[in-house]
Image (spheres, rainbow, N blue to C red):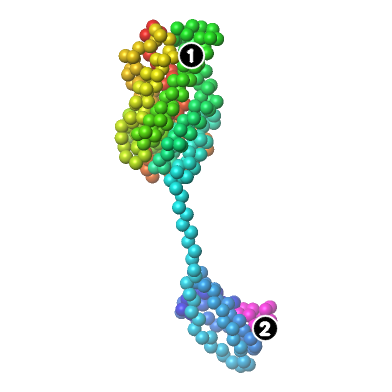
Amino acid sequence: MGVAGAAIKLTGSDPATSQQAVSGDDGRFAFAHVRTGPIHLAITADGFAAQQFDGFLQPAQTLEIPQITLTLATVNTEVKVVPPQVIAEAQIKEQEKQRALGFIPNYYVSYVPNAVALVPKQKFELAWKTMLDPVTFGITGAVAGIQQAQNDFSGYGQGADGYAKRYGAAYADAAIGTMIGGAILPSLFKQDPRYFYKGTGSKKSRLMYALANSVICKGDNGRWQANYSGILGGLAAGAISNLYYPEKDRDNGLILQNALIGIGATAAANVFQEFVVRKLTPNLPSHDPGSGGAGGKAQTLVGKAFGLLGSHVRDGD
């Protein structure tokens, strides 16, 4: 046979008297004390197709078995091609399980190095899920309460009516910023709105990475570029907010200032993501961040809280 380590099973007319042997380095094997009569050999070896031999042993005969050739076994290899959109959807499902402290959504952060780019539909789905999460409404309520306690946007007045107006304005800020900066513009500019956790390197390099990702991001083509989506989204959201804030708190000259504050809030949120949030988030996917990474915008509720608390500087408040 020429195959070492092949298993050979010999059976005769009585199956209870079967014998087994293993071929040597030269592929040879032998059986002793074999009863006369019909014999059957079954030869198997890893990676080879099984072979059989049938013969008849005469009394006092030494039976020489003809050379048996083992052929390579047929290996069926299945190649499954998965579209990038399907892979991205699976990665999003992982992200949607991410909740800091077990309940705060952290959807816009990816711990998967070089995650597949999102298609426009997925960017909008992620934005809607963030906007409609109960915690979003809870944080908005807290922000509106702080604003009312400080009498911010005094044109809204006090009481339940004033609180409702502040709540609506705060939620509109978050919703408009998320939809424009996290879905509409990223789809138009083909940019990824997520922040990609680095997790490796020196603390200084991670800090610089987090700060830089407030103004740069990774495009859907994998190349680094200016974060047009986030920056222009902040400007657009600020301009739209002039439609519903009290008239005395409207100032076109402050739109740019508010956008810059928004960039600072995003930078702070990125740093918080890079050094703190991962430790507070259970059930994260077990991916090695050291194998690569990408940059994006940390549009999380952590960032929203920073933005809602500090992104509106209005005259008279």
Query: Is residue 12 among what the camera can see?
Result: yes
Residue 15 is inside the magenta segment = yes
Label located before the other in sequence (2 or 1): 2
Residue beneath the point at 48% across and 41% down: 89
x and y percentages locating residue 54 in the rendered image:
59, 83
Q: Nearer the viewer, residue 247 or 62?
A: 247
x and y percentages locating residue 244 in the rendered image:
44, 14
Residue beneath the point at 64% across and 88% down: 36
Span highlighted in magenta in the image: 10-19
On residue 13, which mark appears?
2
x and y percentages locating residue 278 in the rendered image:
46, 33
Q: Is residue 317 above or below residue 52?
A: above
Q: Quadrant of residue 103?
A: top right
- The type of residue carrying mark 2 is Ser
Residue beneath the point at 35% across and 22% down: 235
Q: Secondary structure at mark 2?
A: loop
